[in-house]
Amino acid sequence: MNNESLLWWKNTVIYHIYPRSFYDTNGDGIGDLNGIREKVAYLSELGVGAIWMGPVFTSPQVDNGYDIANYREIDPLFGTLEDMDALIATAEEAGIRVLLDLVFNHTSDQHPWFVASQSERNGDYHDYYIWRDPAPNGGPPNDWMAWFGGSAWTYNPHREQYYLNLFTPQQPDLNWENPAVRKELVDIANFWLDRGVAGFRMDVINLISKDFAGAGTWCDGPRVLEYLQEFRQNLHRRDEIVLVGETPGITVDRARAYTLPENGALDMVLTFDHVMVDQSPTSKWVPQRWNTADLIEALLKYQEGLAPECWNSIYASNHDQPRVVSRFGDDDRYWYESATALATLFYLLPGTPIVYQGDEIGMINFPIKTMQDLVDVESRNAYNNFVNEERCAPAEAIARIAPVARDNSRTPMQWSGDRHSGFTTAEKPWYPLNPTGEEIHVHRQMYGQNNGGAHGENRSILRYYQHVIRLLQTDLFRSGELDLLFYNDRAVLYARETPFERALVMVNLCSHEALIPGEYLNNEGTPVTYSYRVLSNTPVPELQINEDFHLPPFSAVVHLFGSVMSSASA
Ligand code: TEU
Ligand code: CA
């Protein structure tokens, strides 16, 4: 294999699956591995080259699988080890690689390691987790707060010590300082690599080394890079696989260090700046005004900071974020326009796109109205905190949580116009389908049953995604350089170029017209012809070099110059 084909992950689109909400094949209302396998044909029609699925391992499901009790077994909710093998094989036949989600910062408190660790101060597992004596007053060892509320320390009467849990108390943090722990984790990763997976997404991987002494933070501690290097060094097929690290709170410098090829750690990181532009820096529940410029700056920070030596990942939403079209677009009046404009803006940037399930059909936020609609542990804890501690009225608590709750993006996938959008034959799916299910679904957008309505009439976001994904397979978008030419609070213009080809990507992300000044549309000096094709989500005038270009509300236009392959036109 040559070096280029080892870097397959630079030339592909990764599709992110939330297993419990993808497709249910045994009628229990919960998506499963066989459901993913049945939809491999769909994924290949969409054009993706890899899937990353959220954790499907044995788990008490306190945090929907991000609390793992056995890393080598599939949770019966999702199927069996044989189902996983079959999925990997079917995907491989379709040219689709499978990535798993490794949750290695913490385990479930039901994991045998933790059960042993909490029962004795000097057994084999005593040092597998982060245990500390109480502070002199008997309280927690320091003031760290858990991400899902409360102190990050939980007292264990048996050991008469506290253990660290950066998420829920049912998710104790592993002690990576213990070499035995690191060895266990490498063995687990190799177990899955030997079964044929092509890499991993590594959950909150920049939290694995805590800085208790120095700055006193839990994020990007002093040994993260060293641990990651050692980890990769010991992996089977270490040069063929991809490691994508989830890294909340990361800085550009750290992101560079973790992804520099010569450092032999990660291949890409998932950064958070762009999914925080609409939130206060101190709390995700406090909204903050944002505009197109803020989003562009958050994205460009890593384009400029990491390229060309390091590689970017590009994602617009995931299972922890609200739906992208509801968040940065307009999921009603400009539903089609804004969903496609956002896809254009994000995925035509250099980097590997990671498309979250349902975004390709423009799924929107769930209309969260009561406490019953909050199923996620983070949402429920926030609700209880607002109502019981901050004395909020229930309606006000819901109003604060609804737009950002993780539940929004975890509703089942909308496959067809059938009952429960064809997701399940069960009476009751684990979470109700979004009420837009009859209008927004794969079948309509794939086969063009457009019966009108706000979400119909030839407005197939899915087909637009297919065009974008095809465009990404051209040399221009695989290797073209990025040139940010213009942006303001409404719109952005960037170019991608090789010596032979050029694309001008224009996106307006607001509900007013926007103007790209003619001075930025000067093509002088670029050795390409002026003949061009257009990918556009809206009728637009011809591009006149040097003349102002008017973009309708929420629109995207890609002008292609040179010999870019013909299938790129839409
Ligand atoms: O998420 C880590 C993370 O950064 C989250 O805290 C995220 O910012 C938050 O969900 C936003 O509200 C990962 C997983 O993606 C998430 O589902 C898990 O709950 C978490 O780790 C703990 O494993
Ligand atoms: Ca099922």
Image: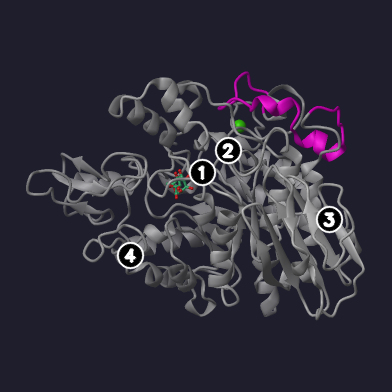
Q: Which residue is at 51% across, 43% downward? A: 320
Between marks 1 and 4, how big is the CA–CA gap?
A: 23 Å
User: Where is residue 20 drawn, in percent x and y?
Assistant: 57, 36
Q: Are marks 1 and 2 in contact (CB under 8 Å)?
A: yes
User: Where is residue 39 drawn, in percent x and y?
Assistant: 73, 42
Q: Is mark 1 within 8 Å of ligand 1?
A: yes
Compared to residue 12, the image places residue 108 above or below, namely: above
Q: Residue furthest top?
A: 427
Which residue, given by chain and number where applicable, does mark 1 sit on?
A: 320
Local packing at callout 1 (Cα closer than 10 Å; few below 14, some 14-19, many 20+) is: some
Does residue 244 appear in this view?
A: yes
Which residue, given by chain and number where applicable, does mark 2 sit on?
A: 409
Depth order, front residue of 483/199: 483
Q: Quadrant of residue 154?
A: top left
Magenta stretch holds residue 425? yes
Q: Magenta stretch?
A: 424-453
Compared to residue 37, the image places residue 51 above or below, namely: below
Q: Is mark 3 within 8 Å of ligand 1?
A: no
Query: Which of the two labelled residues, at mark 3 and mark 1, occupies the earlier sequence position?
Result: 1
Local packing at callout 4 (Cα closer than 10 Å; few below 14, some 14-19, many 20+) is: some
Q: Amino acid at mark 2?
A: Ser
